[in-house]
Image: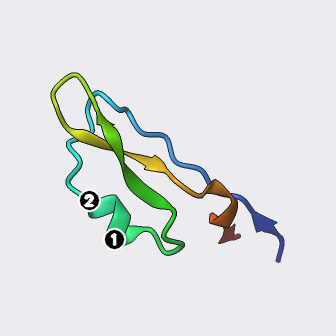
Amino acid sequence: MAKFRGAIVVDTERCKGCGVCITACPCGVIELAKEVNGKGYNYAFMANPEACHRLR
């Protein structure tokens, strides 16, 4: 099986920073940004994209 790097796409204006994606990520690469979006929420982003992988 080949390894593929994964990626996430976050709509930063719609993210409420609930943290569900952080606990659901098996590689632990998602974190909340220190910056806030237009609604005042810290949004999710890939903090360590090199560690992200998934098997197909």
Residue located farthest toward the top when viewing the structure as drawn: 38
Q: Is residue 32 left or right of residue 30?
A: left
Assign a secondary structure to mark 2: loop
Most extreme residue toward the right is 2
Q: Looking at the image, is 49 positioned above or below residue 51?
A: above
Disc 2 designates what residue?
Answer: 19
Q: What is the tally of numbered marks visible in this picture? A: 2
As helix, strand or loop, the secondary structure at mark 1 comes to helix
In front: 48, or 24?
48
Amino acid tagged 1: Thr
**Picture coordinates of residue 10 (x, y %)?**
42, 39
**Residue at image mark 1:** 23
Is the C terminus in the top left, top right, bottom left or bottom right quadrant? bottom right
Q: Position of residue 45 (x, y in %)?
A: 45, 46
Q: Residues within 10 Å of mark 1 (few under 14, many from 20)?
A: few
Q: Residue at x 20, y 38 (%)?
A: 41
For the N terminus, which image quadrant?
bottom right
Task: Verify CB contact (< 8 Å) between mark 1 and mark 2.
Answer: yes
Q: Label 2: few (<14), some or many (≥20) within 10 Å?
A: some
Along the horizontal axis of the image, is 46 left or right of 53?
A: left
Spot occupied by residue 54 in the image (x, y as percentages of width and height): 65, 69
Q: Residue at x 51, y 63 (%)?
A: 29
Asked if residue 6 lies left or right of residue 9, the reply is right
Q: Residue at x 59, y 58 (%)?
A: 48
Q: Amino acid at mark 2?
A: Gly
Residue extending farthest front: 34
Q: How is the image coloured?
A: rainbow
- Whether residue 16 is situated above or below residue 32 in the rendered picture: above
Residues under labels 1 and 2: Cα distance?
7 Å
Q: Quadrant of residue 42?
A: top left
